C-alpha cells in the first residue's frame, strides 16, 4: 500500500529484544531501509560514578561504544544501512527533539507493558512520546 509509505521513520531502541522487533514493522512502511532512523538515549553519568570522577570515560567514548554495539547487532539482523544516533540526556525530550530535527513522519516503538506501581514509578516513555510527538506514533505490543 503506497499511501502508507513514509519518508522518515524513527525507531527508539533500548537494546531490548522488543525494540529490535520494531524494525520489521517499520521496514514495511518505507521504500528503503535508509529511511529508517534509530536513536538510543544514554543517561548522563552520575557525578559519583568512578568514570565521571576520574574522567576515564568521556561522553564521546560512551556514544562510540554504543554505536559500535548497535551497528554489530543491526548487521547481524540484516539491517546494514540504518543510521544510528546516540544522545545523552533525558530520554523523552531527546527522542521528541530528534524526531523534529529529522522531520520524522512516524515514530515506531514497543511498549514494555509495565503495569501498576512500576509504571507509576518508572513512567512510560511510550506514553510520553505519544503525548508530545509532532508526528504519529505506532506503539507495538
Image (cartoon, rainbow, N blue to C red):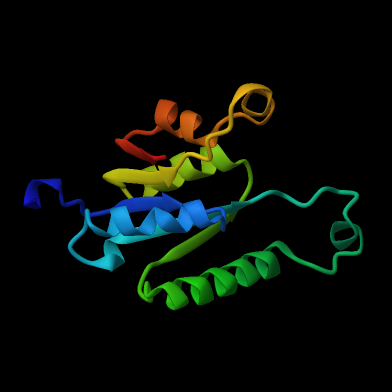
Q: Where is 76 relative to 48, above or below? A: below
Q: Position of residue 73 (x, y in %)?
A: 51, 72
- Of all residues, the one furthest to the left in this rendering is 2
* Front in this rendered view, residue 96 or 139: 139
Number of numbered discs present? 0
Question: What is the x, y in percent for residue 85?
Answer: 49, 60
Compare residues 93 and 29 and report the one nearer the observer. 29
Q: Residue at point 56% right, 58% down?
A: 15
Residue 67 place in picture, x, y as percent: 56, 69
Q: Is residue 114 left or right of residue 138?
A: right
Q: Which residue is painted at 68% across and 65% down in the image?
A: 62
Instruction: Please tell me which residue lies in front, 77 or 98.
Output: 77
User: In the rendered view, would you say 52 is above or below 124?
Assistant: below
Foreground residue, 2 or 91? Answer: 2
Q: Residue 97: which quarter of the image?
A: top left
Residue placed at 37% from the left, 72% from the top? 79
Q: Is residue 10 above or below residue 91?
A: below
Seen in the image, is 56 located left or right of residue 59?
A: right
Q: Please tell me which residue is depicted at 20% across the width and 51% down the height of the picture.
A: 6
Q: Position of residue 47 (x, y in %)?
A: 86, 48
- Horizontal relation, residue 117 to residue 107: left or right: right
Quarter of the image for the C terminus: give it: top left
Amino acid at each position: 500500500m503506497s499511501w502508507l509509505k513514509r519518508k522518515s521513520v524513527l525507531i527508539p531502541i533500548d537494546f531490548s529484544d522488543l525494540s529490535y522487533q520494531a524494525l520489521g514493522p517499520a521496514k514495511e512502511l518505507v521504500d528503503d531501509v535508509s529511511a529508517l532512523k534509530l536513536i538510543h538515549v544514554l543517561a548522563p553519568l552520575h557525578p559519583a560514578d568512578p568514570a565521571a570522577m576520574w574522567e576515564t570515560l568521556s561522553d564521546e567514548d560512551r556514544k562510540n561504544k554504543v554505536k559500535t554495539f548497535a551497528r554489530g547487532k543491526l548487521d547481524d539482523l540484516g539491517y546494514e544501512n540504518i543510521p544510528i544516533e546516540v544522545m545523552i540526556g533525558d530520554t523523552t525530550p531527546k527522542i521528541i527533539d530528534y524526531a523534529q530535527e529529522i522531520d520524522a513522519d512516524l515514530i515506531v516503538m514497543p511498549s514494555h507493558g509495565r503495569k501498576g506501581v512500576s509504571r507509576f514509578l518508572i513512567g512510560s516513555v511510550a506514553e510520553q512520546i505519544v503525548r508530545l510527538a509532532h508526528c504519529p506514533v505506532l506503539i507495538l505490543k
